[in-house]
Amino acid sequence: MFKEKLLLGQYYPVESPIHRLNAGCKILITILYAISLFLANNWLCWGGLSILCLAVIGMSRIPLRALWRGLRVVAVFCLLAVILNIFFYPGETAWQWGFISISQGAFSHGLAIGLRLILLVIFASLLTLSTTPIQLTDGIEALLRPLAPLHVPAHEIAMMMSIALRFIPTLLDEFERIRLAQRSRGARLDQGNLIRRTLALLPLLVPLFVAAFRRAEDLAQAMEAKCYRGGEGRTRWKQSTWKIWDTLALGLFLLLFLGLLLLRIFF
């Protein structure tokens, strides 16, 4: 099923040091790692970030098979980004055949872009795989709480983001059911070239949007039936606490970010 091929929005229940970290800490670490990926400007830094990502994967105890199964979905987009950067990277021409030309450093730049995208997807997937939707909501709300004097609705924003992530696998399940129903009626969705198969999937979007709006309405009615009135005055059954390990982990990634920032400025 499509849900088994996409990692974003799913939670993998296992006991690990990464799962025990505070949700707000993991969100900040993911942001710092993403910025560090784009601050790195040589293969030594990218190699170090790759090793760090592999270390986090090992500590999370999430199977590599599950990560690879989810990575195959975005591999096509990463490959497309690499190809586009190879053929459209500006610079002195190193190879040319007709109207096709490749400049010097294009392969290195294209591979770097592909590596950045892959590491970014993996690290973002680790955030949702190691954090429940409730923990993610609490973490986002805690990070946005300092903006309360500016009348920023922290709880509402966190709730919308967590619901959006939670709906990703749900909508993929709905899409799979619609696809199977159309195939049982004789629709040929997997025949022909890539363009024909893509166009054959377009009629499935209408019932998918209808199902999405129906689920959203059911969720809104359920929240109203439970007297949901926003985040003000609400309490939590389980309180998330910030521990010493959260400080150490965030400090490590903050040092990494500052080191790459200094390298980018002075070298």
Image (spheres, rainbow, N blue to C red):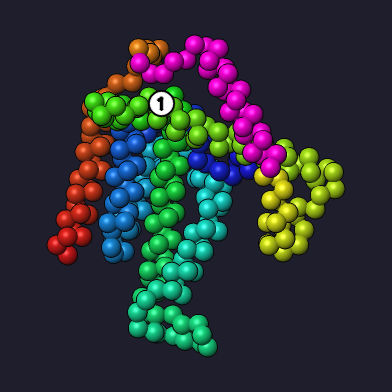
Q: Is residue 74 above or below residue 123?
A: below
Q: Is residue 212 magenta?
A: yes
Q: Amino acid at mark 1?
A: Glu
The answer to which of 64 and 69 lies nearer the viewer is 69
Q: Is residue 231 left or right of residue 228?
A: left
The residue lying at 67 percent from left, 35 percent from top is 210
| Residue at the farthest left position | 266
Residue 259's x, y, as percent?
19, 52
Give the SS element for disc 1: helix
- Decide: is 179 above or below 45: above
Magenta stretch contains residue 169: no
Residue 244: name its quadrant.
top left
**Magenta portion: prevailing SS class:** helix
Q: Residue at x 21, y 38 (%)?
A: 251
The residue that appears at 32% across and 43% down in the rendered structure is 31
Q: For the magenta stretch, what is the residue range?
A: 206-232
Residue at (28% x, 58% y) in the render = 40
Answer yes or no: is residue 232 visible.
yes
Indicate the position of residue 106 as horizontal and vertical percent values.
Answer: 39, 74
Residue 65 vertical placement versus 113 (above, below): above
What is the number of callouts on the image? 1
> In this figure, which residue is indicated by the disc labeled 1?
156
Question: Given the current orientation, which residue lies at the most extreme front position?
Answer: 151
Residue 159's spot in the image, x, y percent?
44, 27
Taking 64 as reference, is 136 left or right? Answer: left
Query: Residue 28: percent from the left, percent from the top?
Result: 30, 38
Q: Image quadrant of residue 2?
A: top right
Viewport quadrant of the C terminus: bottom left
Using the image as rendered, state which of residue 190 and residue 155 is in the foreground. Answer: 155
Q: Is residue 257 above or below residue 90?
A: above
